[in-house]
Amino acid sequence: MHYDNAGNTLPEEPDEPLILPSAFKHGVSENDILHAWRMARGPVDVNYHRDPPTYMYVGPGVSGAVWYEIGTASRAGYDQELIVHAMKARKSYLRKEGLR
C-alpha cells in the first residue's frame, strides 16, 4: 500500500480510486473496498446537497458473502475518484438493488 503526504491510500493502477482514511473507519479492508468498488451496482443514492455530490454504491467483498456500501466523491486536483466511505451495506441500499 502506498500513501500520499496526507495519509491517503494511493492507487496501484491509474484507473483505481484514491481511498481516503475515512473509508477505513468501519474496519473494511482495502481489498474488500476495492473489490466492492470494482463490482459495484448503482449508484443507489446521490447526495446533491454536498459540493461536490457524493455517490453511494453497493458491491460484494472479496468473499462474495458480504456486501458493502461504498461512498465516492470527486475533487478538483485529483484525477481519480475518491472513496470516502465503506461499511457493510445497509438493508435499504441492498433493497434498492433487489438484493434483499
Image (cartoon, helix red, strand yellow):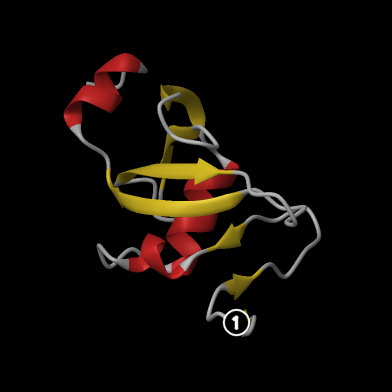
Q: Is residue 62 above or below residue 36?
A: below
Q: Count how many numbered circles sit on residues in the image.
A: 1
Measuring 51% from the left and 53% from the top, which residue is drawn there?
A: 83
- The residue nearer to you, when weighing 94 against 63, is 94
Q: Quadrant of the N terminus?
A: bottom right
Q: List x then y, in percent, for residue 99.
A: 30, 22
Q: Is residue 35 above or below residue 30?
A: above
Q: Would you say 100 lies left or right of 1 here?
A: left
Q: List x then y, in percent, for residue 55.
A: 48, 32
Amino acid type at circle 1 is Met
Quick one: which residue is furthest to the left in this view?
91
Q: List x then y, in percent, for residue 69.
A: 35, 41
Q: Is residue 26 above or below residue 55?
A: below
Q: Is residue 70 above or below residue 54?
A: below
Number of other residues with Cα within 10 Å of mark 1, as a class: few under 14, some 14 to 19, many 20 or more: few
Q: Quadrant of residue 2?
A: bottom right
Circle 1 sits in a helix, a strand or a loop, which is it? Answer: loop
Q: List x then y, in percent, for residue 41.
A: 49, 27
Q: Would you say 86 lies left or right of 8 here?
A: left
Measuring 54% from the left and 63% from the top, which residue is drawn there?
A: 19
Q: Quadrant of the C terminus?
A: top left
Measuring 51% from the left and 43% from the top, which residue is drawn there?
A: 72
Q: Which residue is mark 1?
A: 1
Q: Quadrant of residue 49?
A: top left
